[in-house]
Image (cartoon, rainbow, N blue to C red):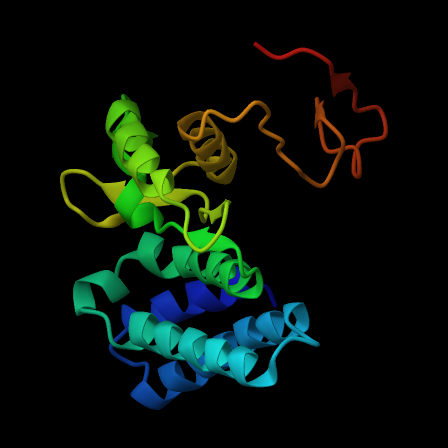
Amino acid sequence: VKTTDLLIRLHKMHTSAEASTKDKETLVEEIGLRFSGMLSSLTSGADGAGSSSHSDSLVNQLVKQLLESEKEKLQNYDFVVSRGEYFAGQVISMALPDCKFVDPEDAVFLKNGPSGTAVVDFEYTMDALKDATSVRSPGPFVVLPGFFGQDRVTKAVRALPRGGSDISGALLGCAMASDVYENWTDVAGVFTADPNKVCSAKKIDTLS
C-alpha cells in the first residue's frame, strides 16, 4: 500500500464521525514508521545519537501535524495528502547535512486559474523563493517538497494539478537562477503514451 493511499484513508477518517481516535493513532503510527524507516536507511552508518534524534523529531512532527492540527486542516484533503511529500522532503533534509528545508507553505503561493484549478501566483512565489533560498544554511543545497503550496486568499494548503511536482522544481530552478533544471522521472523523456503499456509509444523530441 502506498503512503499516499494511507494518507487518503486518514483523511476519510478525519471527515467521518465513525472513526475512533485509536484507529487514527494506529494509522498515523504506521505512516510514521515508514518515514522513520526511510530516514534510518539513508543515515545508516551515521552518528547513532544524531540519527535517533532526527527520527524522534520526524515522528513527533508527523503526529503533531496529522493528529493535533486544527480540525479545518485535518479535513482539508490537500493538506493531509501533501504530508507525504512534506515528510519525504524532511527525510532528505535530515539525511543530508548540507541541506536547507523550504516549506512550500512559506514559499509557493497559489491562486484560482480560469477553470478553478490552482495555478501559481508567479511573481509573489518568485519573491518568496528567492528570499527563502538567499541564505542557505547549513549548506548549499535546498529541498523543496513538490506539488503543493499556500492559497494566497484562504491561506490553506492547496495542491497543484497533475504534474505539480514538475512545476515546483521548475519554480525553484528559476528562483535560484540555475543553469540547468533536470526533471528525473520513470522514463527517459516525454512519450505519446506510457511506453511500459503501449509498445508503439513514440518519444517527443521537442516541446514548446
Residue at 30% from the left image edge and 41% from the top image edge: 107
How far across and how far down the image is residue 109, in percent? 27, 37
Up-down relation of residue 87 to residue 208 (above or below): below
Where 108 falls versus 35 (above or below)?
A: above
Q: Residue at x 72, y 26 (%)?
A: 189
The answer to whether 120 appears left or right of 201 in the picture is: left
The C terminus lies in quadrant: top right
Question: Horizontal placement of 156 versus 168: left or right?
Answer: left
* Front-most of residues 174 and 27: 174
Residue 132: percent from left, percent from top: 32, 42
Whether residue 117 is visible here, answered yes or no, is no
Q: Residue extending furthest right?
A: 199
Marks counted in the figure total 0
Q: Quadrant of the N terminus?
A: bottom right
* Residue found at x 43% / y 68%: 9
Q: Nearer the viewer, residue 28 or 141?
A: 141
Among all residues in the image, which is located at the extreme bottom? 22
Residue 23 is situated, as x and y percent measured from the top left of the image, at 39, 85
Q: Can see residue 48?
A: yes
State the residue at coordinates (61%, 79%): 47
Name the image quarter holding residue 194: top right
Is 79 on the left-hand or right-hand side of 151?
A: right
Quadrant for residue 22, please give it: bottom left
Residue ranking furthest to the left: 153
- Expressed as whole percent of the image width and height from the top left, the position of residue 31 reads 50, 74
Measured along the vertical axis of the image, is residue 205 above or below residue 112?
above
Decide which of 3, 181 is in the foreground and name it: 181
